[in-house]
Image (cartoon, rainbow, N blue to C red):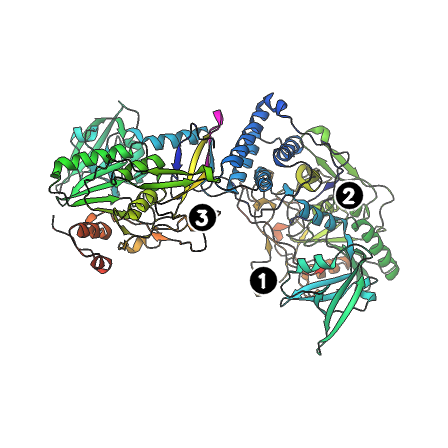
């Protein structure tokens, strides 16, 4: 495995997460080498033959790069659902997403009735300093009307090189006052960690995805919580990983290490035994002072989230509350191709400290607690997990049933969070179904079931 | 064009669906480094070396080829050696070891529609209407038609025992019949009402033209030229086949003129097929062609040419709309590629791609309630990735032919027209069964 320079990354349910590996030597096969004809080269020759015939004889002039891309996608789709080809654009988007930083203004925006609306300016960013307010409608960016743009297009236009200016036309308030604001872009960090004090004595930490910023963000959050809650009153932490689709392996290791001081966190195994890698906690990494910990998971908690919750469960360091996690137990490596595109390839499976693979099974919470789902969302709130994805890596007895992935927008309605706080106060949670707790014993033996790709975590606003 | 050893094929099955993978998003590759085949090779090698499990090279390349072809049109596909062999067999004309019976399912039993002349079944004395109740020791009740047929087929010279009920008294008889190689005719013909030559082509395989020629020979002696009012050429639900057969068969009705032209990507890839004189077998008698939503490609070449040349009146419903030509490009021991290499144009220069051919006299069949909605063909324009042909594409057309010919409205309209009925009357009037 050419892994020296490669980062390990966990794909997300939705194509987020991963980082770049250093460019690798390209290994082309010369035509002569192909002629040297082992079975593999016979196969490559067949491919080359078909490609040439299409190029020469197809009724219309084919776009050759599209053909090759279709071929690569066709080949990768014969593997598992997490191996894919990224063209230059999607590779760049992925890098921005995993880096967790970009040149921009520092506002979260959403789209409402076709209009681009500011959800909130982020503290200490150019947007906040320029006086942009929640609720402002952005009607033009650099004199281009936003009417007709998608949210992505608008975000793309607002992002740009640090220190470059961007002109926004803003409509504000009931009187629809129009303002022109020029903002100079700066480096914006996406907060992947948010935290606050719950009820005066519980430190609540939510990780939305595992980016390059996550480890540092968690440390900052825990430091802050320790200043806000007196040590003698501090009952413990709630680590919320619900609908967190995953991200970078090293960041998930850093997160686990913030709660334990020793022992194995995770191991990865490639095709051959010499590719096994074990990641252990660094002594001195634990920032939690041994305070009790509850981890919240649901059907939308995948890969890096499952490494964290699996490790903390195996170490008996945390109690897991919520619903069964997604079940993505594989590791993807990003391999750059040429100068622009990249291959995202499943290169290994990972195993929790006790040696279990959660692939296509998921992690069962210690206490299963269901949220009340509003009538209009019923049926849409369930996540079909890894076991339902076509072509997923097989793993013995799998669990194809859907798992709930709904988090109420209002904290007062959030039964899983309430159960977590209650447990930290010594109240045992009321379980949804007694049978479903403790060690995972998935009941259903399955083959490959058809299933659609899991939906995106429901976060429609975009930082920018 | 690498067309040396290749067959020219105009589609095989109306539904000739794509094999393999369909993928949603087609992205634009802009790799500045490796591109083309080297880029593919690089990815292939990375997958082989690094994938979490040992991949199957054959599957990888097959996935790539299928993916690439699926990004083209729906008629381009890869044949592995087995699929190629099946394809070639079907172009040669279907052959199997069997008895020589046409059968259908009736009330849970297999009913003999007709024994085929000169086959073991005919020689053993099986008759139209016989009900087969047991095959060897297996009761037919509970079997599907296909299961029953599979049991009756077998190697030549092997024998099979049939228990048969015959007539109103349901007399049971047992036949032991020795199987032979049965050759399925792609052309069937008979005399309709004593004065019309009816020719049905089920597929344009390598024997289609010979079959048509034999039919003409037959009509010349029975009923003889003087009595013959005209011909019905039934191309309904005929999915197509070989281009040269379509050209030859059209030529059996015309003396001169262009039949079809094919155009590839470049101007010099144009080929025109014209009628030779002296091979018209139809004696200038009137011709009615029956088409429907299941009439595709080679069928559309024939009906389009006969329509443009004003040689035939087309009756039925709009045809499928497959206006492209596929070429079989051999890949050595690895099978072959069926690739769309050209579009074809009727003599007047029109492409019927994604449009179909409109009949001169549209006549609909009465579809039984239980089949409604199940017997229309969606047509080329509904296939994902079909070659575009302007903005006016047409989707969907009926493709039902009643098994009982007295209820076959389109056939009856054709007969009436040849007997002198006015075309206007045929469009609206319900089927009138002519006296025979």
Pick out the residue farthest to the bottom.
A175
What residue is shown at x 44% (from left), y 41% (from top)? B75
Is the residue marked by circle 1 packed among few (<14), some (14-19), or many (20+) residues within 10 Å? Answer: few
Residue B354 on image: x %, y %? 41, 50
How many dots with numbers? 3
Quarter of the picture containing the C terminus of chain A is bottom right
What's the mark number on residue A377?
1
Q: Residue at x 39, y 40 (%)?
A: B11
Query: Would residue B204 be seen by someone viewing this image from the given angle?
Result: no
Chain at tag 3 = B
Answer yes or no: do the residues labelled 1 and 3 have beta carbons within 8 Å? no
Residue B233 shows in the view: yes
* Residue closest to the eye, B348 or A175: B348
Q: Nearer the viewer, residue A429 or A396?
A: A396
Left or right of A172 on screen, residue A371: left
Separation (CA) of disc 2 from disc 3: 47 Å
Camera-nearest residue between B306 and B435: B306
> Left of A367 or right of it: where is B316?
left
| Residue at the image point whose x is 70% and y is 78% from the top | A174
**How far apart in space, not on screen, are marks 2 and 1 (Cα)?**
35 Å
Mark 2 vs mark 1: which is more N-terminal? 2
- Is B280 located above or below residue A105 in the figure? above
The secondary element bearing badge 1 is classed as helix
Q: Secondary structure at mark 3?
A: loop
Residue extent of the magenta highlight: B330-339
Chain to which mark 1 belongs: A
Q: Say whether residue B331 is magenta.
A: yes
x and y percentages locating residue B420 in the rendered image:
16, 53
Which of the two marks, 1 or 3, is nearer to us in this view?
Answer: 3
Q: Which residue is mark 2?
A: A250
**Distance CA(mark 1)–CA(mark 3):** 34 Å
């Amino acid at each position: 495995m050419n892994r020296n320079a490669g980062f390990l990354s966990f794909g997300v349910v939705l194509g987020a997460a991963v980082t770049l590996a250093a460019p690798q030597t390209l290994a082309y096969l010369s035509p002569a080498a192909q002629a040297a004809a082992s079975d593999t080269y016979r196969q490559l020759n067949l491919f080359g033959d078909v490609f040439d015939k299409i190029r020469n004889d197809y009724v219309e002039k084919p776009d050759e790069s599209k053909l090759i891309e279709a071929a690569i996608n066709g080949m990768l789709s014969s593997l598992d659902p997490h191996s894919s080809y990224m063209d230059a654009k999607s590779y760049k988007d992925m890098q921005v997403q995993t880096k967790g930083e970009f040149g921009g203004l520092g506002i979260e925006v959403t789209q409402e009735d076709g209009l681009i609306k500011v959800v909130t300016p982020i503290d200490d960013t150019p947007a906040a300093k320029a006086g942009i307010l929640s609720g402002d409608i952005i009607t033009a960016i650099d004199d281009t009307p936003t009417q007709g743009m998608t949210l992505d297009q608008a975000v793309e236009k607002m992002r740009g090189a640090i220190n470059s200016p961007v002109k926004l036309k803003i409509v504000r308030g009931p009187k629809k006052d129009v303002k022109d604001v020029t903002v100079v872009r700066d480096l914006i960090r996406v907060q992947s960690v948010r935290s606050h004090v719950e009820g005066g004595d519980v430190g609540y930490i939510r990780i939305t995805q595992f980016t390059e910023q996550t480890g540092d963000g968690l440390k900052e959050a825990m430091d802050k919580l320790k200043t806000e809650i007196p040590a003698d009153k501090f009952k413990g932490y709630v680590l919320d990983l619900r609908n967190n689709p995953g991200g970078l392996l090293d960041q998930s290791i850093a997160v686990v290490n913030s709660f334990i001081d020793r022992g194995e966190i995770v191991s990865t195994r490639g095709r051959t035994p010499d590719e096994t890698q074990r990641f252990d906690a660094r002594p001195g990494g634990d920032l939690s002072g041994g305070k009790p910990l509850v981890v919240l998971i649901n059907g939308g908690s995948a890969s890096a989230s499952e490494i964290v919750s699996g490790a903390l469960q195996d170490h008996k360091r945390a109690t897991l509350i919520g619903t069964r996690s997604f079940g993505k137990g594989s590791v993807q490596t990003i391999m750059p191709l040429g100068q622009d595109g990249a291959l995202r390839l499943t290169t290994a499976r990972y195993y929790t400290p006790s040696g279990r693979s959660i692939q296509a099974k998921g992690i069962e919470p210690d206490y299963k607690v269901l949220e009340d789902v509003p009538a209009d969302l019923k049926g849409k709130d369930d996540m079909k997990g890894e076991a339902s994805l076509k072509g997923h890596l097989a793993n013995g007895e799998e669990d194809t049933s859907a798992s709930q992935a709904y988090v109420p927008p209002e904290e007062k309605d959030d039964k899983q969070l309430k159960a977590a706080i209650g447990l930290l106060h010594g109240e045992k949670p009321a379980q949804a179904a007694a049978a479903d707790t403790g060690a995972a014993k998935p009941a259903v033996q399955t083959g490959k079931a058809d299933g659609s790709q899991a939906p995106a975590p429901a976060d429609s606003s975009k930082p920018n | 064009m690498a067309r040396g050893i290749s067959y020219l094929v105009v589609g095989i099955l109306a539904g000739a669906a794509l094999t393999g993978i369909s993928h949603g998003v087609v992205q634009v590759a802009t790799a500045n480094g490796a591109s083309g085949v080297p880029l593919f090779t690089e990815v292939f090698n990375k997958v082989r070396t690094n994938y979490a499990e040992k991949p199957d090279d054959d599957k990888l390349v097959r996935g790539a080829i299928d993916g690439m072809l699926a990004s083209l049109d729906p008629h381009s596909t890869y044949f592995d050696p087995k699929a190629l062999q099946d394809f070639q067999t079907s172009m040669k004309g279907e052959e199997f070891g069997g008895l020589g019976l046409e059968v259908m399912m009736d009330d849970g039993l297999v009913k003999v529609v007709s024994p085929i002349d000169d086959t073991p079944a005919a020689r053993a004395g099986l008759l139209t209407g016989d009900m087969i109740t047991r095959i060897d020791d297996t009761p037919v009740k509970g079997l599907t038609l296909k299961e029953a047929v599979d049991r009756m087929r077998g190697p030549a010279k092997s024998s099979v025992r049939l228990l048969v009920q015959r007539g109103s008294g349901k007399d049971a008889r047992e036949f032991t019949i020795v199987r032979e190689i049965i050759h399925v005719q792609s052309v069937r013909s008979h005399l309709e009402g004593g004065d019309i030559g009816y020719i049905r082509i089920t597929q344009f395989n390598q024997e289609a033209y010979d079959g048509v020629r034999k039919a003409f020979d037959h009509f010349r002696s029975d009923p003889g030229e003087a009595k013959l009012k005209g011909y019905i050429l039934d191309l309904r639900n005929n999915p197509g086949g070989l281009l040269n057969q379509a050209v030859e068969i059209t030529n059996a009705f015309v003396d001169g003129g262009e039949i079809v032209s094919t155009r590839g990507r470049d101007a010099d890839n144009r080929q025109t097929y014209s009628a030779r004189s002296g091979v018209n077998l139809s004696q200038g008698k009137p011709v009615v062609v029956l088409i429907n939503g299941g009439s595709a490609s080679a069928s559309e070449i024939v009906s389009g040419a006969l329509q443009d040349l004003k040689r035939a009146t087309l009756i039925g419903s709009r045809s499928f709309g497959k206006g492209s030509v596929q070429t079989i490009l051999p890949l050595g021991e690895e099978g072959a590629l069926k690739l769309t290499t050209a579009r074809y144009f009727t003599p007047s220069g029109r492409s019927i791609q994604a449009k179909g051919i409109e009949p001169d006299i549209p006549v609909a069949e009465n579809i039984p309630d239980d089949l409604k909605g199940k017997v229309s063909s969606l047509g080329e324009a509904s296939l994902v990735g079909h070659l575009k042909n302007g903005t006016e594409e047409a989707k969907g057309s009926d493709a039902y032919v009643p098994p009982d010919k007295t209820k076959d409205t389109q056939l009856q309209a054709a007969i009436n027209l040849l007997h002198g009925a006015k075309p206007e009357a045929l469009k609206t009037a319900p089927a009138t069964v002519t006296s025979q």
